[in-house]
């Protein structure tokens, strides 16, 4: 599937080809703290199928395993764009919230790092729902 995306302010834009069946949720504590949320939703894009315009700010996060991952975001609006290996990334983990066609992707197909999940985040059906903020 061909997608486009970018940051909120328009400084960063990208195009990619992705497999919508590869959308996933990560509940690891790094994704929680880096996203400011309970989990992060991503989809991989091969490096040869990803073109970015604009210069994102990069924060390098070293995982407990020692793996270094570049976290890319807009230096103006702060919108998260992707994560990737620091050198010669084979793929980019695109942040679903930055994808213009995110509705068309459908529901995620897998969840990882569920041992770190906030208990309530695994089932939101009992939480009251409103069509808009009141």
Image: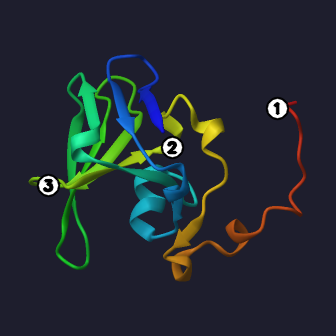
Residue sticking out furthest to the bottom: 115
The residue singled out by tag 2 in the image is: 96
The residue singled out by tag 1 in the image is: 133
The coloring applied to the image is: rainbow
Disc 2, SS: helix
Mark number displayed over residue 47: none
Q: Position of residue 78 (x, y in %)?
A: 38, 32
- Comparing 5 with 129, the one in front is 5
Look at 25% across and 78% down and name the residue there: 64
- The numbered mark, 1 or 2, whose residue comes first in the sequence reads 2
Q: Which image quadrant is residue 56 in?
A: top left
Disc 3 to disc 1, C-alpha distance: 39 Å
* Residue 116 versus residue 70 in the image, above or below: below
Q: Position of residue 81 (x, y in %)?
A: 37, 38
Crowdedness of circle 3 by 10 Å Cα count: few (<14), some, many (20+)? some
Q: Position of residue 60 (x, y in %)?
A: 19, 54
Image quadrant in which the C terminus is located: top right
Q: Position of residue 77 (x, y in %)?
A: 39, 25
Disc 1 to disc 2, C-alpha distance: 22 Å
Disc 1, SS: loop
The residue singled out by tag 3 in the image is: 86
Classify residue 82 as left or right of residue 123: left
């Amino acid at each position: 599937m061909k997608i486009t995306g970018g940051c909120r302010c328009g400084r960063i834009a990208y195009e990619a080809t992705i497999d919508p069946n590869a959308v996933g949720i990560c509940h690891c504590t790094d994704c929680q703290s880096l996203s400011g949320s309970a989990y992060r939703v991503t989809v991989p894009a091969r490096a040869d199928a990803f073109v970015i315009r604009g210069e994102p700010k990069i924060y390098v996060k070293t995982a407990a395993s020692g793996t270094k991952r570049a976290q890319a975001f807009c230096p103006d609006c702060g919108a998260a764009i992707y994560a990737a290996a620091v050198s010669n990334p084979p793929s980019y983990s695109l942040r679903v919230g930055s994808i213009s066609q995110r509705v068309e992707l459908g529901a995620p197909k897998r969840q990882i790092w569920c041992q770190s999940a906030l208990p309530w985040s695994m089932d939101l059906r009992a939480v009251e729902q409103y069509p808009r903020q009141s």
